[in-house]
Image: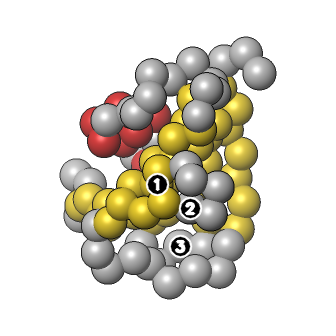
Amino acid sequence: MPGLAIKLREVRQEPARNTKTAQTKTNMPTEEWIKTIEDGRLVKFTNQTLPGFGAFVTAQIEKSEIVYSIVVDDAKNPLGRHEVENRFKAELSKR
């Protein structure tokens, strides 16, 4: 998959309260954290390393059912938090 693909989808999910790193059933490391962006909204980010492929990253604004997700196939593993947050900067700046 050249470049990156951005897809929007709705999910019903409670916002996370804590930062954590977990191993999924497929042994792919996943990191989650919450950050307050410039306009005061809370955003939950996730970063799942895809072995030999890249990363699957998401961002969800507090109290929103929309989750922004990107498959980054040209990513170094693992992506840093700043790199993940920058992937969503344009979408998160919209009100």
Question: Quick check: 9 left or right of 72?
Answer: right
Q: In the picture, residue 33 is in which quadrant? A: bottom left
Looking at the image, tell me whether mark 1 or mark 3 is earlier in sequence order.
1
CA gap, disc 1 to disc 3?
21 Å
For discs 3 and 2, the disc positioned in front in the rendered view: 2
For discs 1 and 3, the disc positioned in front in the rendered view: 1
Q: Identify the element where label 3 is drawn.
A: loop
Amino acid type of disc 1?
Thr
Residue at image location 57% in from the left, 18% down from the top: 74
| Residue 57 versus residue 23 in the image, above or below | above
Give the image's coloring scheme: secondary structure
Amino acid type of disc 3?
Ser
Q: Position of residue 62 (x, y in %)?
A: 42, 73
Residue at image location 59% in from the left, 38% down from the top: 50
Q: Which residue is mark 2?
A: 24
CA gap, disc 2 to disc 1?
7 Å
Question: Quick check: 81 left or right of 88?
Answer: left
Q: Which residue is mark 1?
A: 30
Q: Position of residue 17 (x, y in %)?
A: 32, 79
Badge 2 vs badge 1, beta-carbon distance below 8 Å: yes
Circle on res. 64: 3
Q: Identify the element where label 1 is drawn.
A: strand
Q: In the picture, residue 71 is in which quadrant? A: top right
Question: Quick check: 24 left or right of 77?
Answer: right
Q: Nearer the viewer, residue 40 or 78?
A: 78
Q: Position of residue 5 (x, y in %)?
A: 70, 32
Looking at the image, tell me whether mark 3 or mark 2 is earlier in sequence order.
2
CA gap, disc 3 to disc 2?
24 Å
Q: Quadrant of the N terminus?
A: top right
Amino acid type of disc 2?
Thr
